[in-house]
């Protein structure tokens, strides 16, 4: 990460980098919650790879640096997961964003789903806000795409999709070994509901990947999948 982003006191998203202006919510957060002082560093991003250094001045942003463009990832990575009860979806989206997922996909109800949203659009808008706030905290300049509700059938045909399954290939455990070169790396991991998927819900042709030897809660599996995907992506980029 670039030092100016890492070391800024705050990071915000704006509509236009040419003349960055804060939303009322962000202005309140910076002035009343963070209590920024004049001259403190703030970075502003358009969420599409562009950002620039600013400073806090009289309750607004003052531009102090040129616009910088960070290329889009050459290979997007993401997790598709079944919604769970309570506020654990917020937690999952927050952590997926912090870890660096490009795509966060909420699955439509499957056979063993406990959660069945009657207000999916409202829930997705809320989760998009959660992702934006997490991207601010983690200094991202590309906002993740939060989408749903996507049917399992559509998720299974996403490029690079694999299903998290205890009986699956331990691809992630083989990262960096000679064996990993013979395996196709997943770029999207699909995590089922607490009750899992039935055998007949997943075609035999769909790759299955193991997330470890223990039984995980659904939201834990989501987090583990994201962490392993991000690690694999970094390892590939470094090779």
Image (cartoon, rainbow, N blue to C red):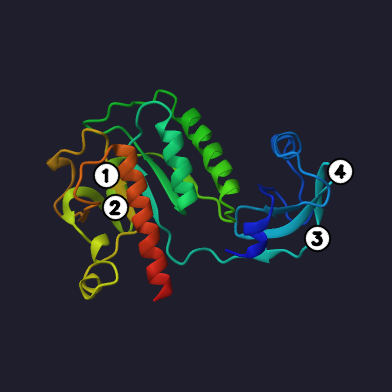
Residue at the disc numbered 1: 153
Residue at the disc numbered 2: 157
Q: CA distance from mark 1 to mark 3?
A: 49 Å
Q: Position of residue 11 (x, y in %)?
A: 66, 50
Q: Position of residue 150 (x, y in %)?
A: 36, 40
Q: Nearer the viewer, residue 105 or 13?
A: 13
Decide which of tag 4 and tag 1 comes sooner along the chain: 4
Q: Quadrant of the N terminus?
A: bottom right
Q: Position of residue 106 (x, y in %)?
A: 38, 39
182 relative to 231, above or below? below
Q: CA distance from mark 2 to mark 3?
A: 45 Å
Label 3 crowd bin: few (<14), some (14–19), many (20+), radius 10 Å: few
- Are dots 3 and 4 in contact, CB under 8 Å? no
Q: Which mark is residue 64?
A: 3
Q: Residue at x 33, y 26 (%)?
A: 115
Q: CA distance from mark 1 to mark 2?
A: 7 Å
Q: CA distance from mark 3 to mark 4?
A: 15 Å
Q: Residue at x 19, y 39 (%)?
A: 197
């Amino acid at each position: 990460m670039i030092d100016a982003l890492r070391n800024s006191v705050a990071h915000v998203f704006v509509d236009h980098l040419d003349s960055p202006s804060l939303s009322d919510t962000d202005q309140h957060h910076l002035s009343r919650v963070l209590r920024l002082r004049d001259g403190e560093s703030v970075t502003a991003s358009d969420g599409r790879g562009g950002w620039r250094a600013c400073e806090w001045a009289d309750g607004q942003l003052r531009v102090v640096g040129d616009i910088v463009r960070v290329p889009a990832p050459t290979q997007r990575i993401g997790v598709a997961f079944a919604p769970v009860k309570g506020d654990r979806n917020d937690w999952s989206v927050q952590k997926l964003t912090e870890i660096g997922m490009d795509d966060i996909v909420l699955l439509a109800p499957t056979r063993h789903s406990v959660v069945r949203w009657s207000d999916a659009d409202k829930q997705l808008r809320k989760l998009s806000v959660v992702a934006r706030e997490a991207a601010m905290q983690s200094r991202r300049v590309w906002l993740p795409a939060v989408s749903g509700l996507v049917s399992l059938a559509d998720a299974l045909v996403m490029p690079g999709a694999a299903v998290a399954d205890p009986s699956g290939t331990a691809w992630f455990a083989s990262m960096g070994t000679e064996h990993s070169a013979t395996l196709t790396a997943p770029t999207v991991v699909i995590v089922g509901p607490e009750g899992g998927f039935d055998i007949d819900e997943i075609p035999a042709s769909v790759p299955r990947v193991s997330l470890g030897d223990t039984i995980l809660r659904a939201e834990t599996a989501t987090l583990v999948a994201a962490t392993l995907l991000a690690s694999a992506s970094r390892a590939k980029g470094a090779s």
